[in-house]
Image (tube, rainbow, N blue to C red):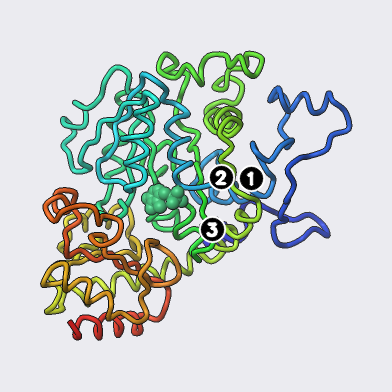
Amino acid sequence: MENATKCIHAGYQPKNGESRMIPIIQSTTFKYDTSEDMGKLFDLEASGYFYTRLQNPTNDMVAGKICALEGGTAAMLTSSGQAANFFATFNIAQNGDHIVASSSIYGGTFNLFNVTMRKMGVDFTFISPDASDEEIQAAFKPNTKAVFGETIANPALTIFDIERWAKIAHKNGVPLIVDNTFATPINCRPFEWGADIVTHSTTKYLDGHDATVGGCIVDSGKFDWMAHAEKFPGLCTPDESYHGITYATKFGKEGAFITKCTAQLMRDFGSIQAPMNAYLLNLGIESLPVRIKQHCANGQAVAEFLASHKNVAWVNYPGLKGNKYYELAQKYMPNGTCGVVSFGVKGGRKTAEKFMKNLKLAMIATHVADARTCVLHPASATHRQLTDEELVACGVGPDMVRFSCGIEATEDILADLKQALEAI
Ligand SMILES: *Cc1c(COP(=O)(O)O)cnc(C)c1O
C-alpha cells in the first residue's frame, strides 16, 4: 500500500457499525471484570489498557499509522518531540553510557543532550554530519550505546547521510536513531537506509496546522539486541519491576524497544500525549502527502526566486542545484526535501529586521513547518543573547532569515517576498 493510502487508512479499521473516524478515548482508566485480568496487564502477560499515563487506545491507533508510514514494527506517541528524543536515547543509554550524535541537530535536542542528559550521567560526542568515516569511528568508546542524527537538520538544513552513518553504527554494534521530523515519511523513510529507530516532533508537518505539540518513536524491529546483549542490559536482562521478564526475549526484536520504553519510561515520566491531541494529529496526517507536495513546491520556488534576487546575499536550500547537500538530498529525498529555506539579506542585521517588518503574508513566529508561511530572524529572536561573532560561530549569521513556506499559493508567497525585498 502506498503511503498516501496509509495516511488515510492505517492504524484504525472500523468494524461493522463503528465510527469511521478514530474514536477519542478520553478516559484515564479502563475497567476489568476481575483482578486477575488486570494483574496480567501489570505483569505484561497480556496486552491491554489500564491507565492512560502509560498507554491509550486513541494514541496507539495514531502511533500505528505513523509506524505503518515509516515501515516499522512498533511505535508510541509522546507528549512532544523533546520527550520522543529523550525516551529514544534514554531507553538504551543510562548513567555511565555514551552516545555519538551529529552536531547538526535541532537546538532543543542539542540542549537536551549536552546539558540535561549530561546531568543524568549520559555522555555525548558531537560530530559534524560531514565528518569522514574515520573521524566518526574515532568518536566511539567502549560505552557507546547509540548514534543519533537528523534527516534534514533544523535549522541548518544539512542532510544526514543515513546509509553511511548506519553502517558505522552497526559495525560498532549499536543502533542508529534518526529524527525524521523535517523530511516526514512521505519524503524519506530512514529504515530503508539502515536506521533502526526513528523519532518525530509531530508538532511540525505531521500535525501541520499549528494545533498540537507531540512526538513519536518508531522501531524498525531490525536491531538484534541479544546479539549485543552485554551493551544493552536494560533490554537483555530481567526487569525486576516486572517480575523478571526480559524484554528482548519476551517481545523479540520487533517489540522489545517500544515495550520497555512504555513500561518503564512512560510509566515513570508520564510524558503521554492527550488523546484529543492524538485525534487532531491524525487529522493532520490524513492530508500529509497533499500538503507536503505544496510545502516542497513552495520551498523550491522561494529558494529559486531568492537565489536570483539582487538584495539577497545567499540562499540555503538542499533542493537548490549547487547546494552542498543537493546530491545527498536527491539520493534520500528525490521527491522533495521540506518547505524551510534559509537565506541572508544583503546589508546584515538592520536590513534583515527591516525586510521582516515589510512582510505581510508571512507571519513572524518561532514555529516552522506548518500550513501558514512564517518567518524568523534568529539573531533577534531565538539567538538574541549572542554577539555577532558568537552568531557566526554557531552557524546563525546576523543576516540569516529562516523562512518556512506554508501551503498558500506560490504566487502569493513570492509576491510577498518580492515587495518586502524591494522596500528595503
Ligand atoms: C521541533 C523539533 C523537535 C522538538 O519537538 P517539540 O515537539 O517542539 O518538543 C525535535 N526535533 C526537530 C527536528 C524539531 O524540529
Answer whether residue 188 is visible to the viewer in this image. Answer: no
Disc number at residue 212? 3
Residue underneath mark 2: 77
At label 3, the amino acid type is Thr
Residue 422 percent across, percent down from the top left: 19, 85
Precedes in sequence: disc 1 or disc 3: 1
Q: CA distance from mark 3 to mark 2?
A: 13 Å
Quadrant of the rendered image containing residue 370:
bottom left
At label 1, the amino acid type is Asp
Q: CA distance from mark 1 to mark 3?
A: 17 Å
Residue 89 percent across, percent down from the top left: 42, 32
Question: In this rendering, which labeled residue sits more in front, label 3 or label 2?
Answer: 3
What residue is rendered at 22% in x and 27% in y? Answer: 139
At label 2, the amino acid type is Leu
Nearest to the observer: residue 65 or residue 142:
142
Answer whether residue 251 is visible to the viewer in this image. Answer: yes
**Residue at the far front in the pictured view:** 385
Q: CA distance from mark 1 to mark 2?
A: 7 Å
Q: Is residue 19 left or right of residue 299?
A: right
Q: What kind of element bears circle 3?
A: loop
Q: Is residue 234 left or right of residue 301?
A: right
Q: What kind of element bears circle 1?
A: helix
Precedes in sequence: disc 1 or disc 2: 1
Quadrant of the rendered image containing residue 372:
bottom left
Disc number at residue 252? none
What residue is rendered at 78% in x and 24% in y? Answer: 39
Task: Count residues near mark 3 (Cα–Cα under 10 Å), then give few for <14, some for 14-19, many for 20+.
Answer: many
What residue is rendered at 35% in x and 75% in y? Answer: 362
Residue underneath mark 1: 60
Precedes in sequence: disc 3 or disc 2: 2
